[in-house]
Amino acid sequence: MNIVMLTNTYLPHVGGVARSVAAFAAEYRRRGHRVRVVAPEFENQPADETDVVRIPAIQHFNGSDFAAPLPVSGLLSEELDAFQPDIVHAHHPYLLGMTAMRIARYRALPLVFTHHTLYEQYTHYVPADSPAFRRFVIELATRYANLCDQVFAPSESIATLLSERGVETPITVVPTGVEVAHFAQGDGAGFRRMLGIPEDAFVVGHLGRLAPEKNLGFLAQAVARFLAAEPRARFLLVGTGPSESAIRAVFDREGLGDRLQLAGILQPPELADAYHAMDVFAFASKSETQGMVLTEAMAAGVPVVVLDAPGVREVVRDRRNGRLLRDETAEAFSAALQWLADLPQEKLRQVSQDALATADGFSMARTADKALACYQALREKSFVTRSQEQERWEQVLRLIEAEWEIIKETAQAAVTALNEPETSGRPLP
């Protein structure tokens, strides 16, 4: 198959969507499919990319580390004429997601949409942030999903939420898979030496974008509380983002700055080394649709401590492969970290084995099988053969129809959001 993926974030941007698109694209290519990724330009992007089409973009949109692609979809026509896609896959409902819809409608191709993100959790990046705007982005994503042929939900929690919000398009749960073999091997001891972490330290780790929506203020306070009670403990933080200075401030204020280890952005195989340097992976985000970093940590045999949330509860089994906490206090989180630190070696090995077994259930091979089966089912839907002249005319009509549907649904989402009372029966999560 020829698969074109359109995404508003892609490597070298640090984030779950970028990593997900790259992982699926790599797996599809390994199986002999052709994949073309359409993404915005980013600073420090590779100079020698293959099968990636970059769209001019505004860098550091509204002070964030995101890039906002400019509306230049016409530049893709020649590229796609040569590529001849069979499937169009959108990874966002806006910006390049709108371009994906135009392409799919114009070329009479199936459109798949992965609902990676709880968009209402990210509206603080937009100057117009308000309850009405958060309702708008929910309505927009829902209406976009209903214009697609297939929706992928990264977890059962999100599939249920989308149905409750009114998505009627078929929904299939397709998490981002983990490369189990890649993360199973790593030089944790060498990584510790490189950062000056003592060999006998108990290392609490975290990996991801350091951004407000990840609940990192809470995580920093909880981990600092644990470190204050456990002299041999260290906190290993992998990633960068706007919350880095706030995290530093928490540890400096508690007199623990020398036990905070900042590793910055890492690339494979360093990621696997970092996971293997950890004794436990700590995660407090409630804005996720899937705990991708959790399955990566588990593939390295590292148990996790998390707050109960969508996309997380499908992965973590309390006191089996880690701790799943419904008590959202720093005291409870710190106590869960201490529970793991105090486990006898035999019990800790069992928790590690359970983590490995969990990761195997989320392998990339399994998740790619599900995605490709959906693609194939969409391709097999019958299409009536038309003459070239009739086909050209209908392409024009489809393009006009696509533009009208986009305008109509965007406007209706705005009207619904503005008219919906604050105390309606559809509260924001």
Image (cartoon, helix red, strand yellow):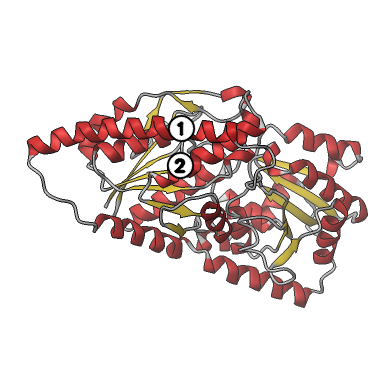
Residue 100 appears left or right of 86 = right
Report the front residue among 414 and 299: 414
Q: Where does the image place residue 230, in percent across and percent down from the top left?
A: 89, 56
Report the front residue among 382 and 117: 382
Q: Where does the image place residue 261, in percent across and percent down from the top left?
A: 76, 43
Residue under the image location 26 percent in, 53 percent down: 1
Residue 254 vertical placement versus 411 (above, below)? below
User: What is the spatial separation of the Cα atoms under label 1 and label 2, in whole angstroms?
Assistant: 8 Å
Would residue 91 be seen by someone viewing this image from the given angle? no
The amino acid on which the numbered mark 1 sits, given as a three-letter code, is Thr
Residue under the image location 91 percent in, 40 percent down: 255
Name which of mark 1 and mark 2 comes first in the sequence.
2
- Tag 1, which secondary structure? helix
Residue 163 appears left or right of 298 = left
Residue 4 appears left or right of 122 = left
Residue under the image location 84 percent in, 54 percent down: 233
| Residue at mark 2 | 143
Q: Where does the image place residue 106, in percent across and percent down from the top left?
A: 25, 36
Report the front residue among 260 and 312: 312
Residue under the image location 52 percent in, 47 percent down: 116
Q: Which mark is residue 410?
A: 1
Residue 320 vertical placement versus 125 (above, below)? below
- Which image quadrant is residue 212 in? top right
- Which image quadrant is residue 188 in? bottom right
The amino acid on which the numbered mark 2 sits, given as a three-letter code, is Arg
Q: Residues within 10 Å of mark 1 (few under 14, many from 20)?
A: some
* Label 1 close to label 2 by CB (< 8 Å): yes
- Tag 2, which secondary structure? helix
